[in-house]
Image (tube, rainbow, N blue to C red):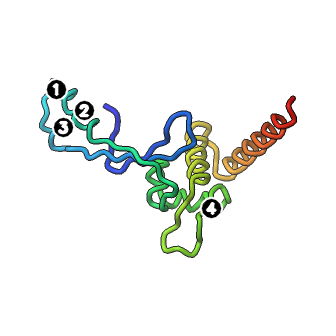
Amino acid sequence: MPRISRGSLGLRQGEKTVTKTTCYQDTKAIRDASHDDTERVRRKMARNIYTKVVEKLSLSELSMFCDASVDWVAQLVEHGVVAPISYAAAEWEFDRVHIDRARKAARLMRDLRLNVAGVALVLDLIEERDALARKLALMDF
């Protein structure tokens, strides 16, 4: 059974758009459901999912989105991987670009077991490569 949690966040496949998906899960119904009723309960839960595009996420939402702790996001900020919109706010907020970078950082750390400094270097190199590819495309080669 796929993990569905209240307030889980995700990215649409093939797009750089950040979406916020919320599923109101009736845990009692799952607990009380027999093995035969599991599919019926899943279909009922799937009808209660909605998606909306968000332009920014708070610190706690970003940590939930990346399936990490708030301290991990603070480490990313310290190393320059992501930057909040404003450092003066009571709770940091992050725009789409930095939400995408945080998600990539989480994948790099999980899949390649890189540390935060390594992730910062890899993300910078990826962005530099993409910028060069865009310039090359403009030169029509």
Q: How many marks?
A: 4
Image coordinates of residue 42 in percent, x first then y, are 24, 32
CA distance separating discs 3 and 1? 10 Å
Circle 3 residues within 10 Å: few <14, some 14–19, many ≥20:
some
Mark closer to the chain start, 4 or 2: 2
Mark closer to the chain start, 3 or 4: 3
What residue is at 33 percent from the left and 41 percent from the top? 4
Q: Which residue is mark 2?
A: 42
Image quadrant in which you'd find residue 131? top right
In the rendered image, the quadrant that contains the C terminus is: top right
CA distance separating discs 1 and 4? 46 Å
Q: Which residue is mark 4?
A: 83
In the rendered view, would you say 118 is above or below 92? Answer: above
Circle 1 residues within 10 Å: few <14, some 14–19, many ≥20:
few
Residue type at mark 1 is His
Residue 30 disc label: 3
Image coordinates of residue 76 in percent, x first then y, are 61, 57
Mark 1 or 4: in front is 4
Residue type at mark 2 is Arg
- Is the C-beta separation of discs 4 and 2 under 8 Å? no
What residue is at 83 percent from the left and 37 percent from the top? 138
Circle 2 residues within 10 Å: few <14, some 14–19, many ≥20:
some
What residue is at 61 percent from the left and 41 percent from the top? 108
Could you say whether the residue bearing mark 3 is in a helix, strand or loop?
Answer: helix
Mark closer to the chain start, 1 or 2: 1
CA distance separating discs 3 and 4? 40 Å
In the rendered image, the residue lying farthest to the top is: 36
Image coordinates of residue 130 in percent, x first then y, are 75, 40
In the rendered image, the quadrant that contains the N terminus is: top left
Q: Which residue is mark 1?
A: 35
Could you say whether the residue bearing mark 4 is in a helix, strand or loop?
Answer: loop
